[in-house]
Image (tube, rainbow, N blue to C red):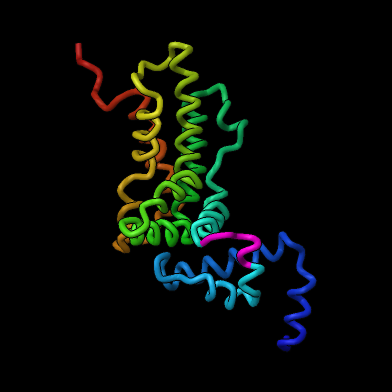
């Protein structure tokens, strides 16, 4: 496509399309340069749009980065039907597999690494990242655990803390090894094994039944 044709195509974009193109450009720039070194001028250049258009959609680099994270981490959620399954173990397994499957995706891993690398200079990124993805997943677990506590089916002191523990168990050590580049992402079967064991230990404990 010629530069003129590309410019005309850009002009025909809807506002939603322009915002999407800007987020895609920003994601590429953030991952290439890091958050602190990324510049709005460069995002506008990569997107093929003016700085004015960029600032009309995203008034600051912080707002732009949060929008990128929200889009990248949007799949990390739960179908309400899954959260409300009558079978508690099945509900927990389903929710956790949904979270874990997404958190091992290359795009999410790249964003996770970026946040870890930048958080000391820009601590606000950690909160934005948590709200956009993992926090939503943990909140879904917390809600279901709180319901079961009210029904008297679970003996827990703190639903939020319990949800975080279960979430961490389900991710397993493999997530940390992947972030460090020490191993590849596990396959679906391996993820299921860890999730199933996490739910089993969480609901029934690890101690063997006493012998007679």
Image quadrant in which the N terminus is located: bottom right
Give the residues drawn in magenta, as a range. Answer: 54-60
118 and 159: which is toward the camera: 118
Q: Is residue 82 left or right of residue 96?
A: right
Q: Is residue 41 left or right of residue 176?
A: right
Tell me if I can see residue 72 in this picture: no
Residue 178 locus on image (x, y percent): 35, 58
- In the picture shown, does residue 160 fall above or below 61? above
Q: Is residue 60 left or right of residue 165?
A: right
Seen at 51% across and 36% down, the residue is 94
In the image, is residue 132 part of the stretch drawn in magenta? no
- In the picture shown, does residue 103 fall above or below 3? above
128 and 111: which is toward the camera: 128
Residue 136 locus on image (x, y percent): 50, 39
Seen at 48% across and 49% down, the residue is 101
Residue 154 locus on image (x, y percent): 40, 17
Residue 122 figure quarter: bottom left
Image quadrant in which the C terminus is located: top left
Residue 24 figure quarter: bottom right
Seen at 34% across and 38% down, the residue is 169
Numbered-mark total = 0
Q: Residue furthest bottom?
A: 2
Seen at 45% across and 29% down, the residue is 142
Q: Is residue 105 left or right of residue 122?
A: right
27 and 157: which is toward the camera: 27
197 and 120: which is toward the camera: 120
- In the picture shown, does residue 92 fall above or below 105? above
Residue 71 locus on image (x, y percent): 57, 54
Tell me if I can see residue 8 in this picture: yes
């Amino acid at each position: 496509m010629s530069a003129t044709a590309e410019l005309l195509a850009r002009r025909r974009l809807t506002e939603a399309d322009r915002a999407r193109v800007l987020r895609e450009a920003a994601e590429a720039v953030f991952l290439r340069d890091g958050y602190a070194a990324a510049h709005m001028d460069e995002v506008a250049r990569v997107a093929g749009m003016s700085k004015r258009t960029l600032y009309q959609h995203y008034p600051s680099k912080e707002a732009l980065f949060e929008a990128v994270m929200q889009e990248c981490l949007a799949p990390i959620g739960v179908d309400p039907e899954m959260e409300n399954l009558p079978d508690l173990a099945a509900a927990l397994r389903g929710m956790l597999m949904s979270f874990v499957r997404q958190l091992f995706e290359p795009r999410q891993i790249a964003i996770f690494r970026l946040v870890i690398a930048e958080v000391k200079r820009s601590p606000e990124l950690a909160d934005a990242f948590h709200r956009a993805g993992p926090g939503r997943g943990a909140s879904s677990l917390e809600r279901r655990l709180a319901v079961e506590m009210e029904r008297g089916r679970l003996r827990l002191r703190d639903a939020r803390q319990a949800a975080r523990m279960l979430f961490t168990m389900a991710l397993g050590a493999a997530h940390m090894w992947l972030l460090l580049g020490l191993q590849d992402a596990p396959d679906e079967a391996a993820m299921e094994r860890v999730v199933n064991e996490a739910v089993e230990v969480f609901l029934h404990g690890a101690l063997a039944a006493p012998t007679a």
